[in-house]
Amino acid sequence: MTIIHAVNADTRPRHVAGSLRDRLSVMPAVVVTGARQTGKSTLAQELTPGRRRFLSLDDMDVLDAARRDPEALVGGDEPVTLDEVQRAPDLLMAIKRAIDRRRRPGQFLLSGSANLLLMRRVSESLAGRASYLTLWPMTRRELRGLGRCGIWEELLGAPDRDWLDLVAAQPGEPQDWRDLARRGGFPIPALRMETSRERAVWFDGYVTTYLERDLQSLASIAALPDFRRLVRAAALRLGQLVNQTELGRDTALPQPTVHRYLNLLETSYLLVRVPAYAVNRTRRLIKAPRLYWADTGMALHVTGSGEVPGAYLENLVLQDLLAWRDARLDRAEILYWRTASGEEVDFVIETGDRLLPVEVKATSRPRLGAAAHLRTFRAEYGEQARAGLLLHTGPALEWLAPDVLAAPWWKVL
């Protein structure tokens, strides 16, 4: 068992930190989940106020104690941080009893890699006792030491007419988005590794650990070659509509197996499916989602390609949006929009009854035609829709049309 006194001076602050503190000040338990190696353990060690017991269930002695005498492990007056708690899900009942005996804000901070069984047990055992946060791979501004995501909150809070001045005031300089996509947002390869070869070794080890350890804790996968084939096929379809029948045909797998494997990837926070926007919320569940990855570096490694297609710039924007969305107390939805005739908008941010459409173009010189679908969306939804935002790779910051602002992606992210 370890008492945390100091933190690693090299660690960059995370956007979710403020939300974590807020929740710990109110709820007796906060649960932080996400993919392995996104920085959950570091976040838990650094950002929990005061002196806490820090226990990792990756430590075999701690894991043994959790299984033999869970009441003793979580008892006492000190607040407790339990890392990799999915390794002993039965511990949750002891935590529930400890909360019910003496309900105190910040009593437990639980972190762990995503697990269907764990999340079901958490929601059942800690109903009304816990708040939930997701830690995604690091955003561009987190990697730069700024401890935040893009300026989505500022854009939503400002009148549309003020957007140009707001974006122009943002610090920073042009950056090669392809380099950012290759590095991804996992802290170790993004911050500590300079060469593509080093990162390839790290990603290869990550995939092996995921397949041989994490995946087996989620579900029994007997045919790992089949699963690997599906993972690569999914990565090659980044940014496209999910078609499970087509994926099954290309990987020689039955559609139910494809469905199961995609769900496992999403549960592990490696795959992200963006639902379609529709006024009728039930239809959002019926329309095909678009497929992205939680980390662009991982997706590129899985494909084995040296090329970085434009869809990866969309994926970088999505990664930033997810980090922003899941740290908010007021829920926002991240969706895409597509008509039967093929008009589409990459992302629609839905907050309350307002919609902010965002288009991403891997071009340095956007023309008026690039704003056409944004304008169609605005015409369709009228006053409910904010001005359109078109993110591109060039330096120009200008109103392409009275209702569409073109901005460099690095000024917003």
Image: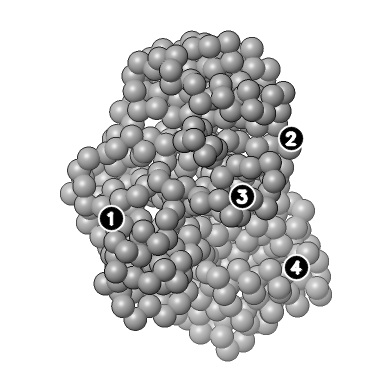
Residue at position x 60%, y 68% from top?
119
Which residue corresponds to the image point at 64% horizontal and 42% vertical from the top-left?
A: 278
Residue kind at label 2, given as amino acid type: Asp
User: Eyeballing the image, is 350 above or below 128?
Assistant: above
Residue bearing the label numbered 3: 284
Q: Earlier in the sequence, mark 1 or mark 3?
A: 3
Crowdedness of circle 2 by 10 Å Cα count: few (<14), some, many (20+)? few
Q: Which residue is mark 4?
A: 127
At which x and y percent is residue 205?
27, 63
Q: Which residue is mark 2?
A: 353
Badge number at residue 302: 1
Colour scheme used in the picture?
Answer: one colour
Task: Say whether disc 1 or disc 4 marks the residue closer to the N-terminus.
Answer: 4
Viewer-side label of 1, 2: 2
The residue under the point 40% across, 62% down is 245
Question: Type of residue at label 4?
Answer: Ala
Between 137 and 289, the one lying in front of the other is 289
